[in-house]
């Protein structure tokens, strides 16, 4: 399986609590997210992202799907979800599994399974771990045309990566999807 990180990010690099994304959703953007979800066979997330997703998706039904997005709620509910957390005691969302220890080894095992993408959204702390252990196969940065000013940045001072751009997809709202793969030194 390929591990794919997707991040909503402002022009100034802020990823924290991206409540600013709403006005940029339209049919073409929703199709992008729909296609991404259906290319995935698993979701991987950190504790904060899991806590954010659960109340939004735990009771989602087909009636919650946007027009043209039929099947989205069922898909996200049914996919296996892997949560990296030392503090969650029980996973209440359907088909959720907790990695409490040895998460790097667990993720390596997960990547060896056959299937589609392992999708990572948000999960900034987890992303640092994934990067440090060279576990990310693809980065999708959804760059929003605004400067937020304050908030958690995507990369820490310890983050290091050389990336190669493989695709650029502009949306009519001004959002640009930039897809990168890691460049490994030989």
Image (tube, grey):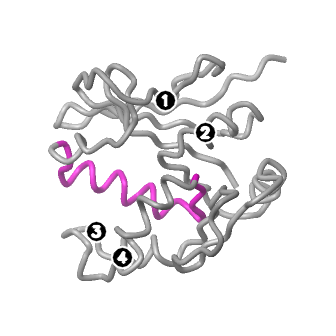
Quadrant location of the C terminus in the rendered image: top right
Q: Residues within 10 Å of mark 3 (few under 14, many from 20)?
A: some
- Give the residues drawn in magenta, as a range: 24-46
Q: Point out which mark residue 71 bears.
A: 4
Query: Where 147 sits versus 122, above or below?
Result: above
User: Where is residue 91 drawn, in percent x and y?
Assistant: 59, 74
* Residue drawn 82% across the image and 57% down it: 109
* Residue drawn 51% across the image and 60% down it: 50
Sequence-wise, the earlier of marks 1 and 4 is 4
Label 2 close to label 1 by CB (< 8 Å): yes
Q: Which residue is mark 1?
A: 154
The alpha-carbon separation of the residues under discs 2 and 4 comes to 28 Å
Query: Where 36 sits versus 17, above or below?
Result: below
Quadrant assignment, res 73: bottom left
User: Where is residue 4 drawn, in percent x and y?
Assistant: 58, 46
The alpha-carbon separation of the residues under discs 2 and 1 comes to 9 Å
Q: Point out which mark residue 127 bears.
A: 2
63 left or right of 120? left
Which mark is in front, 3 or 2? 2
Q: Callout 4: helix, strand or loop?
A: loop
Q: Nearer the viewer, residue 106 or 114?
A: 106
Label 4 close to label 3 by CB (< 8 Å): yes
The alpha-carbon separation of the residues under discs 3 and 2 comes to 28 Å
Sequence-wise, the earlier of marks 2 and 4 is 4
Q: Which residue is mark 3?
A: 69
Sequence-wise, the earlier of marks 1 and 3 is 3
């Amino acid at each position: 399986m390929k591990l794919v990180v997707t991040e909503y990010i402002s022009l100034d690099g802020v990823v924290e609590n991206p409540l600013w994304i709403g006005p940029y959703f339209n049919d073409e953007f929703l199709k992008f997210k729909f296609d991404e979800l259906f290319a995935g066979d698993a979701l991987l997330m950190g504790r904060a992202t899991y806590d954010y997703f659960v109340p939004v998706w735990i009771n989602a039904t087909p009636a919650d799907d946007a027009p043209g997005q039929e099947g989205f709620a069922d898909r996200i509910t049914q996919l296996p979800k892997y949560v990296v957390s030392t503090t969650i005691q029980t996973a209440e969302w359907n088909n959720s599994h907790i990695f409490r220890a040895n998460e790097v080894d667990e993720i390596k095992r997960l990547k060896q399974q056959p299937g589609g993408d392992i999708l990572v959204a948000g999960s900034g702390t987890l992303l640092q771990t994934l990067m440090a252990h060279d576990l990310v196969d693809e980065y999708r940065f959804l760059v929003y045309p605004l400067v937020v000013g304050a908030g958690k940045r995507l990369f820490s001072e310890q983050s290091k990566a050389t990336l190669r751009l493989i695709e650029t997809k502009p949306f009519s709202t001004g959002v640009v999807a930039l897809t990168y793969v890691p460049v490994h030194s030989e």
